[in-house]
Amino acid sequence: MGRQSGGLVGDELVGGGDWQYALARSNRAKEMDGLEFLEIEINEITRINIGKNDAHIYIENDDKFQLIVDRDTGEKLADILK
């Protein structure tokens, strides 16, 4: 898979952070029938390209990532970033 910039791996909180916060967010994702939880800081988003059916979110911290989501989610995020 590649490097991880943060998150829970085994019994360690990668990148440091608050266990209570991570646990609360993970539990909230489970309550919403989510299988995984991913948190991206707003200042790490460098660009969003909205396509016909999906949106590409470009993320940059120590590494560069691209996240592909549905168009509606991309549009909502783009509105937040305005």
Image (spheres, grey):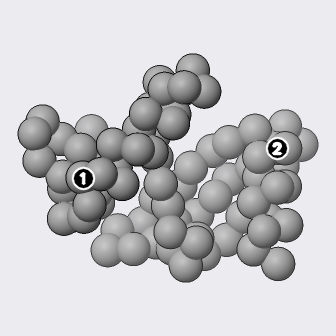
- Pointer 1: what residue? 19
| Whole-percent x, y for residue 65 in the image | 46, 59
Residue type pointed to by label 2: Arg
For the point 18% across and 41% down, the residue is 9
For the point 60% across and 27% down, the residue is 32
- Pointer 2: what residue? 71
Mark 1: few/some/many CA within 10 Å (<14, 14-19, 20+): few
Q: Earlier in the sequence, mark 1 or mark 2?
A: 1
Tell me, yes or no, if residue 57 can be seen here.
yes
Question: In which quadrant of the rendered image does the C terminus lie?
Answer: bottom right
Q: Would you say the residues marked 1 and 2 are in contact, meaning their CB atoms lie under 8 Å apart?
A: no
Task: Answer with left or right where residue 34 lies relative to residue 54.
Answer: left
Circle 1 sits in a helix, a strand or a loop, which is it?
A: helix
Residue type pointed to by label 1: Trp
Circle 2 sits in a helix, a strand or a loop, which is it?
A: helix
* In the rendered image, the vertical position of residue 53 relative to residue 22, given as above or below: above
Residue nearest the viewer, comparing 20 with 62: 20
Task: Answer with left or right where residue 50 lies relative to residue 3.
Answer: right
For the point 53% across and 55% down, the residue is 66
Q: Residue furthest left?
A: 11
